Image (cartoon, helix red, strand yellow):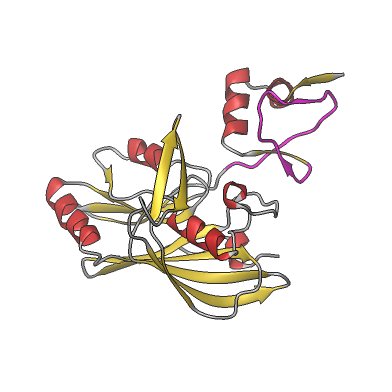
Amino acid sequence: MMQKAYKLLAAQENISNKRAKELIDRGLVYSGDKKIKIARAQMPEDSRFRVEEPRDIEIIYQDDDMVVIDKPAFIESSDIEKAIEGARLLHRLDRETSGVLLLSRNEEFSRKAINAFRRREVKKVYVAWVEGVLYEELSVDLPISTDRRRGSAFSRVDRKRGKEAISRIYPDEVQGKKSKIRIEIDTGRTHQIRVHLAHLGYPIVGDEKYGSTTQSKRILLHAKRIELLGMSFEAPEPKEILRYK
């Protein structure tokens, strides 16, 4: 007999159908090593599920001006903003991206920080595991455009309509046919790192949206360090980023 995945999960975990759908939609539910992507997918009634709950949110630094968060994967940046009273996001990280996230606590600091972002005086360093063997440093200057539909965004290299996007890539380690790299970005276009790497033929591991063929619990991208206004903040690499296997 077959049954919808969310109903099977709800019965197994003794939770509501709504909560079961939410967990599947957030990419937190697995059967064996396979991520369940469609809540209404028909599955055998004896299917067993595993729920991968995100790790706790940790505060790296805070004062009267700002809060710096070590954002776990699988949590929306906007949900963190809602959870911290009086704080406003200065930038965003994709849901499956972990790492340093900055929020402001007052308008004066917001203006200073936003102006620093606009003047490209903010240094952002990411680490990622990508498909393919990468030995050389690369600089990418390719414009990006973004289409937004039904709350979802998809970006592409677009030399006619795209906005300037600059990424610098530094190889750190190779394991088999996967490479660990550092990425510095001068601009902050939607999905910029993911698009640039995919365009070069090195999609980020787990990033099926942009061409990865490797299954992973998450997109293996981490915002490691941000420097702005004379300050530097760093989030330690989670275990799945620290070592691929």
| Residue bounds of the magenta highlight | 32-53
Residue in front for this viewpoint, 119 or 62: 119
Number of marks = 0
Q: Position of residue 170 (x, y in %)?
A: 49, 76
- Residue with the most extreme front position: 160
Q: Is residue 173 left or right of residue 123?
A: right
Q: Is residue 232 left or right of residue 41?
A: left
- From this view, report whether residue 182 is shown above or below residue 215: below
Q: Residue at x 71, y 70 (%)?
A: 177
Q: Position of residue 191 (x, y in %)?
A: 45, 52
Q: Residue at x 79, y 42 (%)?
A: 32
Residue 16, visible in the rendered structure: no
Q: Is residue 198 left or right of residue 167?
A: right
Q: Is 159 one of the magenta-colored residues? A: no
- From this view, report whether residue 119 is shown above or below residue 95: below
Residue in front for this viewpoint, 147 or 118: 147
Residue 14, visible in the rendered structure: yes
Q: Is 49 one of the magenta-colored residues? A: yes
Which quadrant does the N terminus fall into?
A: top right
Q: Residue at x 63, y 25 (%)?
A: 20
Q: Is residue 199 left or right of residue 93?
A: right
Residue in front for this viewpoint, 73 or 188: 188
Quadrant housing residue 139: bottom left
Q: Position of residue 227 (x, y in %)?
A: 30, 67
Q: Residue at x 57, y 51 (%)?
A: 210
Q: Main secondary structure of the magenta part?
A: loop
- Residue with the most extreme left position: 108
